[in-house]
Image (tube, grey):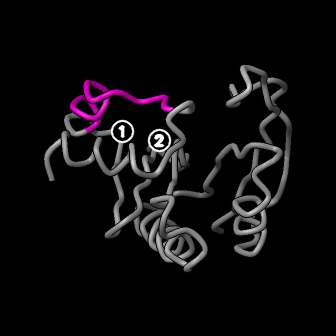
Amino acid sequence: MSAEEYFNLYKKCVDIDSIQFSLEDFKRFQKSKNIKIEKEKYCIAILGLTDHEVEIYFIGVAESLRGRGLGKKLLKNIISFSKYYGADFISLEVGINNIPAKNMYLSFNFIEYGIRKNYYRNSSDGREDAIIMKLNLN
């Protein structure tokens, strides 16, 4: 896929007020050894790779298709990839008010291990805390 196609899919999977990545970012992602873009038909994830960790920078499903298990399928693929990659754990942040996503991560045995105060901008020009979550793969 081209950077433009990835970026267009990303825009379908994120609140317009929450866009954090640009087309230029996706062009850089494709050239980076430390970034992997994982996608399914209507969902996308952006992963940061280090020696022993995979960090989920973004995971999203097109708004019109949420609640159908597509995010779970993508997360299963990320976990499989992470094990193959040799990561010891997967980490991520999730908005404290994003209950569906938080519950999905908990259902995969992610644990909460911290809070980032006022981490996300929300649609009302306010800030929202993020829960830091981790899945041990060993």
The three-letter amino acid code for the residue at tag 1 is Asn
Q: Tell me where residue 66 appears, x and y as whole percent.
A: 55, 68
Of residue 110 and residue 86, the one placed in the foreground of this image is: 110
- Compared with residue 116, is residue 90 higher up or lower down, i.e. above or below? below
Q: Tell me where residue 108 appears, x and y as whole percent.
A: 70, 73
Disc number for residue 34? 1
- Compared with residue 2, is residue 60 higher up or lower down, i.e. above or below? below
Q: Residue at x 40, y 56 (%)?
A: 44
The three-letter amino acid code for the residue at tag 2 is Thr
Disc number for residue 119? none
Q: Tell me where residue 100 appears, x and y as whole percent.
A: 73, 63
Query: Toward which corner of the image does residue 85 lie, by quadrant?
Result: bottom left
* Residue denoted by label 2: 50
The kind of secondary structure the magenta stretch mainly shows is: helix
Circles 1, 2 touching at the beta carbon (< 8 Å): yes
Q: Which segment did they paint magenta?
A: 19-29
Secondary structure of the residue carrying tag 2 is loop
Query: Toward which corner of the image does residue 106 lie, by quadrant?
Result: bottom right
